[in-house]
Amino acid sequence: MMINKNLFEQLPTLAQDPAQFETLFAARDFRTRLIQAIREASKRIYLVALYLEDDEAGREILTELYEAKQRNPGLDINVCVDWHRAQRGLIGVAPTETNAAMYSAFAEKYEHKFPVYGVPVRGREVFGVLHLKGFIIDDQVIYSGASLNNIYLNYKDRYRFDRYHVITNPALADSMVNFVQQEMIEHPAVNNLACLSKPETKEIKATIRQLRSSLAKAAYQFEPQEVNANQVAITPLVGVGKKRNKLNQCINQLLAMAQDEIFICTPYFNFPRSVAKEVKKALKRGVKVHIVVGDKTANDFYIPPEQAFKTIGGLPYLYERNLRQFAKANEANIASRKLSIHLWKHEENSFHLKGIWVDKRYMLITGNNLNPRAWKLDLENALLIQDHYHHLTEQFDQEVANILQHTQLVCTYRQIEKFECYPDAVQKLMKKVTRVKADRVLKQIL
């Protein structure tokens, strides 16, 4: 265990003033703060998200960006979204105009334009997407797992719950912007979706492979800083693919060095094998483990039984079955309170929260879902916070309390609905998937 600790202490760090680190607790506050930051921007705006949707909230953000650019044409604005996701509609919804069509339409309306780059992490979306997070506005990093649309920004009645942090740190902001510029925007596989003359995916297949290969070797570059007793340490991390993935290694080490307590949030209960192994080892060491996961009805793919069933609606049940099996295998740990499983559910809202807290000294802020897909396929990043002097403990505790307020504690695996109680269409689908052993493949890509 000491080897892991030493490796951790060797990580390069940036010094962070705790007074310039703020946690937001609601999607609506996140939207307000993002818009305020865009309006006040004086030198640069770099937004990176899985998608910027063609809906009211997406158009509001795009409008704010264009108005900021018209007021200040010298403002450096760049938006990066996933190449594939931007050129298709929502899963399970009838085809409509794509998000890319909205970017082109906006660009034609304004005198001073800016690019919306499509980043193709793989030749096909199913094998990897841009899951990198971070909105850098001047010297501020607004970090969230959220994408930009109505539900993530709580534009109407419903919200998708995530984590939201506002960090003012020029060196961190510079490092994240440099990564976006040098590792993504400058690569020939990355094209402007707001431009009418963009290539077809098949035309850039070779350059997409080159992009993935270079991203697999990439890292955030910065001059390491000494961290004094009045500061906290931040390390930005990035990873893609299974081999030599620094972010994956860091997550495993973080769990391996826990001595007292681990608190994990994941929207889709489907741990990679190495994470499941570290959680098991931690429980054996006597570490108290809390896992917060969305109830199946709070999953973004959940379809209520009264609505017409589509295949994609089977996913929440697949995750729930994983959770029930895990809870059953750990019934003794649940009974002895070594393991606490919290199911999140709040009205008709959904849950998209991820992250790890260890021993109230380490916190990982990330968009990583802690599932095999994040582990092997998607481009992911994270901010590792080391708080050895407990400057942020109060904020961490507040955030945890905010997360737990809409959860129910699982006291026995029997609380979790069993297969026999699922709607007939779900049972039929899951039997078919299991019969052809497709569930093993699905667990790797979902």
Image (tube, rainbow, N blue to C red):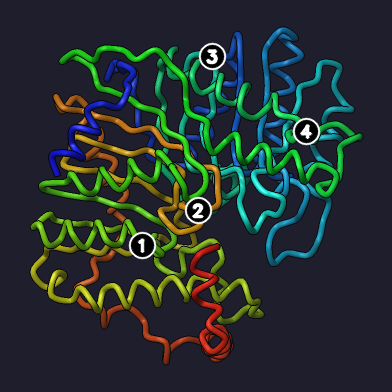
Residue at 54% over, 38% down: 216
How would you rate the neighbour count of disc 3 (Cα within 10 Å): few for under 14, some for 14-19, many for 20 or more? many
How would you rate the neighbour count of disc 4 (Cα within 10 Å): few for under 14, some for 14-19, many for 20 or more? many
Disc 4 on helix, strand or loop? strand
Q: Is residue 328 left or right of residue 21?
A: left
Q: Amino acid at mark 3?
A: Asp
Could you say where residue 333 lies in the image, as x and y percent from the top left? 14, 69
Residue 138, labelled with which disc?
3
What residue does disc 1 label?
A: 273
What residue does disc 2 label?
A: 376
Relative to 279, say whether 211 is above or below.
above
Residues marked 3 and 2 touching at CB (< 8 Å): no
The foreground one among 287 and 58 is 287
Mark 3 vs mark 2: which is more N-terminal?
A: 3
**Residue 268 occupies which quadrant of the picture?**
bottom left
Residue 111, labelled with which disc?
none
Residue at 14% over, 56% down: 288
Point out the image quarter for the N terminus: top left
Q: Amino acid at mark 1?
A: Arg
